[in-house]
Image (tube, rainbow, N blue to C red):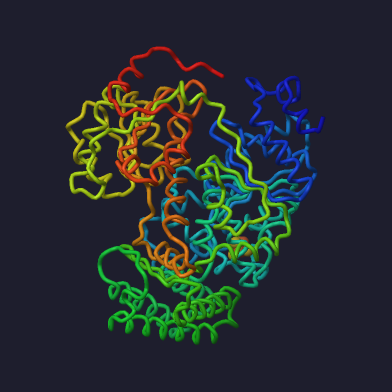
C-alpha cells in the first residue's frame, strides 16, 4: 500500500489523528491519482464534486512527495485556510515535518521604505491630515509586526487609500538598492518561500510571476517540481489581468506623488521636477474628462477617433516625456529618484505599446471609473501564453476544482489553456443530491429579455421562499437586476433583506446567517466561494443563465477571434463558460451531508432551447420538478437527509 493510500485508510494516520475523519472513496481515489501524477510527472485535471475533501486529496500526496510544491488558489480565503488550518493539521497527523510558507502578492505586505517616506514627507506632498490617525496606527503596528501582512491591521479598512502609499508595486520597489532591504517584508516572505518545500500562493501571484519573467525582471516565485492549481476554473480568467500591457491613472498618479516625495527628500531645489509631476496629474484629469463622465469599459476603437481623446492622450504622453527628462536630471540625487525615472521610462514604453497598431492577436480597451481610467492591450490567446509558461516552469501541473467539466467533458477547460496531454478525472460529490435537494424550474416565465422579467422571477420564486421560510440566496446575473429586485422587495416582504453592496461581504453573510429567515440578494461575488452550511441556507434562486456579456471588449474580441478560426463562439466559449458559472452558483446550496434545499432556476431557456440540456446535464443529480406544490412538500417533509 502506498503512503498516500495508507494515510486515507480506515485505521490510517488521518483517521487516528483527526476527529470526525471518515474514509471517502472519492477523496482517496483523487489522492492516489494526484500521487501518481506527481510520480509520473504527468499533467492532471481533476474535478472533485463539493464535499469530496479535495484539499486533503492533493495536500497529503504533496506533503508526502518530498518534492517542492507550489499550491495556488483563486481566493485569499482559501489560501489562508490552507496555510493556517489544513496544512498544519495534516503535517501533525502525518508526522511530516515539512517546511511550508505562505506567499501573497506584494500589495499585502508593508513596505518600510514607503512608510518612512509617507511619515517624513507625505504631508508636504499633499497627503491629507484626515489620514493621520490611520497612519499613526500603521506606524505603531509596523514596529511590532513580524510578517508585515497588512491583514493583521484590522482597524484600518482594507480599502483605505493609505495602504497604497505604504505598500509596494513591482514598479516602485527599489529592490536591492533599497535602504530598508534588510527589513523588507516582501523580501523575507520570498526568502521563506525559497526555503519551503510547500508554498501556498494564489493565481494572481502565479500569473504575475510569468508576466514579470516575460518582462525580463527578477525571479519572483521559487522553483517548483509540482504546481497544484485549486479553484482552477478561475485560472484562465486571472491571466487576462496580467498578460499584455496596461497603464492606469493609479500607476501614473502614484509616480507623480512619489516624485514629489522623493524631490522633497533629495532634490528640494529642483522646481522643474515638481512642475512636471503636477503637470502629469493635471493631464491625467483632463484625459479622464475627455473619456466622458460615465463609468464604462469598452473597446478602444469606440473612442479612438474622438478629437478630445486624441488630444488628451497626446498631452498625457508629452507630460510623461517631460517628467522623464526632469527625472533623468534628478536621478543622480538619490536611489528613489533614480527608481522614479526608470518607472517613468517603463510607463512611456507601455503607452507606446498600447498605441501601436491593432493586431488580430490582441484587443485594446479602456475602462473608466469616477476618478480615473486604465488603458489595456490584452492578448486573446491565453493558450499560447500558458504553453510558454509551462515550458519555462518545467513542473508537473495539477488542476482541480468542483467545476471544470461541461456535460462530463473537459474540452472547454483544457482548450482555454491549450492543454492536450493531461489525464482528466472526475470524482462525484458524496452528497445524496436526490434526497437532499430539489431542482425547481417554474413554468410560464417570459423570455429573459422581457421588461418585467425580474418581477416575474420574484413572483415565481415567492411560493418557494414562503415554503423555505426565507433562508435563501437570490443570485442575479447583473447589477441592474439586483437593484430592481431589491427595490421591488423593499418593504413588501416579511423576510429581512440583505443586499450586496450595503455592507462588507463578510458582515452581510454573518447578518444573513444570524437572521435565520433572511433573503440575500447578490451578483457575481456571491456565485462562488461562499459557504453557508446547514439550515441557514435552504434555497438558491438564480434569475438567468449566466452568459458572459458580449458587450465586454475582451469577451467580444475573443468571440470574434474564435469566429475567425471558423468555430462557433457560442458552442466553443459562451455556452461552456456559462455552464461552469451556473454550476458554481448552484453549488452554494448543498455544502454538507445534512444540508437540504431547493434550487430554483428561473430561466425558461433551460427547457425551451436545445442547449438547456447541456446545463441540466452538468448539474448534480437532483430530482427535478415544475410544480410548486412539490417544493412545498419537500419543505414540509421533516425527514432529514440521511448521511451516506
Ligand atoms: S525592497 Fe521594495 S518593498 Fe522592500 S522595503 Fe524596499 S522598496 Fe519596499
The percent position of residue 217, horizontal first and vertical second, equals: 65, 70
Check the image and report above or below for 253 versus 329. above
Q: Position of residue 268 (x, y in %)?
A: 48, 79
User: Is 8 positioned to the left or the right of 405 in the image?
Assistant: right
Residue nearest the viewer, comparing 172 with 92: 92
Q: Residue at x 47, y 17 (%)?
A: 641
* Residue at the image position 47 percent from the left and 56 percent from the top: 572
Image point (42%, 83%), residue name: 317
Which of the two residues, 605 or 67, is positioned nearer the viewer here?
605
> Which of the two residues, 638 or 182, is positioned nearer the viewer here?
638
Q: Is residue 366 above or below residue 610?
A: below
Q: How many marks?
A: 0
Q: Residue furthest top?
A: 638
Q: Quadrant of residue 452?
A: top left
**Splitting the image into four quadrants, where does ligand 1 fall?**
bottom right
- Residue 543, quarter of picture: top left
Amino acid at each position: 500500500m502506498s503512503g498516500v493510500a495508507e494515510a486515507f485508510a480506515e485505521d490510517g494516520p488521518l483517521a487516528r489523528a483527526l476527529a470526525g475523519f471518515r474514509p471517502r472513496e472519492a477523496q482517496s481515489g483523487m489522492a492516489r491519482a494526484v500521487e501518481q501524477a506527481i510520480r509520473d510527472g504527468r499533467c492532471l485535471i481533476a474535478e472533485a464534486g463539493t464535499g469530496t475533501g479535495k484539499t486533503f486529496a492533493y495536500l497529503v500526496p504533496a506533503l508526502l512527495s518530498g518534492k517542492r510544491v507550489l499550491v495556488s488558489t483563486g481566493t485569499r480565503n482559501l489560501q489562508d485556510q490552507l496555510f493556517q488550518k489544513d496544512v498544519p493539521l495534516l503535517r501533525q497527523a502525518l508526522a511530516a515535518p515539512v517546511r511550508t510558507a505562505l506567499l501573497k502578492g506584494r500589495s499585502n505586505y508593508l513596505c518600510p521604505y514607503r512608510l518612512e517616506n509617507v511619515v517624513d514627507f507625505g504631508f508636504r506632498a499633499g497627503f491629507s491630515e484626515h489620514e493621520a490617525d490611520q497612519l499613526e496606527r500603521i506606524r505603531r503596528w509596523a514596529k511590532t509586526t513580524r510578517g508585515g501582512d497588512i491583514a493583521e491591521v484590522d482597524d484600518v479598512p482594507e480599502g483605505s487609500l493609505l495602504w497604497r502609499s505604504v505598500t509596494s508595486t513591482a514598479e516602485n520597489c527599489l529592490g536591492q538598492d533599497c535602504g530598508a532591504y534588510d527589513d523588507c517584508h516582501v523580501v523575507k516572505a520570498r526568502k521563506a518561500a525559497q526555503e519551503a518545500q510547500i508554498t501556498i500562493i494564489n493565481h494572481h501571484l502565479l500569473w504575475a510571476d510569468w508576466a514579470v519573467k516575460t518582462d525580463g525582471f527578477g525571479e519572483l516565485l521559487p522553483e517548483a517540481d509540482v504546481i497544484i492549481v485549486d479553484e482552477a476554473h478561475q485560472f484562465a480568467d486571472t491571466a487576462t489581468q496580467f498578460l499584455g500591457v496596461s497603464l492606469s491613472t493609479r500607476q501614473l498618479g502614484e509616480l507623480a506623488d512619489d516624485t514629489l516625495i522623493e524631490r522633497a527628500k533629495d532634490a528640494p531645489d529642483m522646481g522643474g521636477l515638481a512642475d512636471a509631476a503636477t503637470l502629469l496629474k493635471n493631464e491625467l484629469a483632463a484625459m479622464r474628462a475627455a473619456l466622458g463622465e460615465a463609468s464604462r469599459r469598452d473597446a478602444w476603437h469606440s473612442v479612438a477617433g474622438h478629437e478630445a481623446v486624441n488630444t488628451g492622450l497626446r498631452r498625457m504622453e508629452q507630460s510623461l516625456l517631460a517628467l522623464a527628462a526632469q527625472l533623468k536630471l534628478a536621478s543622480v540625487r538619490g536611489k528613489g529618484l533614480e527608481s522614479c525615472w526608470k518607472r517613468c521610462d517603463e510607463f512611456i514604453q507601455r503607452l507606446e505599446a498600447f498605441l501601436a497598431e491593432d493586431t488580430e492577436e490582441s484587443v485594446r480597451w479602456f475602462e473608466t471609473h469616477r476618478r480615473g481610467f486604465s488603458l489595456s492591450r490584452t492578448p486573446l490567446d491565453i493558450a499560447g501564453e500558458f504553453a510558454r509558461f509551462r515550458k519555462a516552469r518545467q513542473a508537473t501541473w495539477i488542476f482541480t476544482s468542483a467545476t471544470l467539466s461541461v456535460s462530463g467533458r473537459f474540452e472547454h477547460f483544457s482548450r482555454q489553456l491549450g492543454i492536450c496531454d493531461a489525464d482528466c478525472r472526475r470524482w462525484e460529490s458524496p452528497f445524496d443530491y436526490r434526497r437532499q435537494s430539489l431542482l425547481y424550474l417554474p413554468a410560464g416565465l417570459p423570455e429573459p429579455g422581457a421588461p418585467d422579467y425580474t418581477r416575474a422571477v420574484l413572483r415565481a420564486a415567492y411560493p418557494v421562499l414562503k415554503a423555505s421560510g426565507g433562508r435563501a440566496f437570490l443570485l442575479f446575473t447583473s447589477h441592474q437586476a439586483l437593484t430592481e429586485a431589491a427595490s421591488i422587495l423593499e418593504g413588501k416582504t416579511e423576510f429581512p433583506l440583505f443586499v450586496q453592496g450595503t455592507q462588507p461581504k463578510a458582515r452581510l453573510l454573518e447578518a444573513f446567517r444570524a437572521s435565520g429567515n433572511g433573503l440575500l440578494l447578490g451578483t457575481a461575488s456571491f456565485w462562488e466561494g461562499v459557504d453557508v452550511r446547514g439550515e441557514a441556507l435552504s434555497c438558491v434562486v438564480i434569475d438567468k443563465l449566466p452568459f458572459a456579456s458580449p458587450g465586454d471588449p475582451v469577451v467580444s474580441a475573443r468571440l470574434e477571434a474564435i469566429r475567425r478560426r471558423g468555430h462557433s463562439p457560442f458552442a466553443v466559449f459562451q455556452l461552456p463558460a456559462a455552464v461552469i458559472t451556473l454550476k458554481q452558483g448552484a453549488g452554494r446550496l448543498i455544502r454538507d451531508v445534512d444540508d437540504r434545499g431547493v434550487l430554483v432556476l428561473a430561466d425558461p431557456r433551460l427547457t425551451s432551447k436545445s442547449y438547456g440540456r447541456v446545463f441540466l446535464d452538468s448539474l448534480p443529480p437532483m430530482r427535478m420538478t415544475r410544480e410548486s406544490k412539490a417544493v412545498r412538500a419537500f419543505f414540509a417533509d421533516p425527514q432529514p437527509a440521511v448521511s451516506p
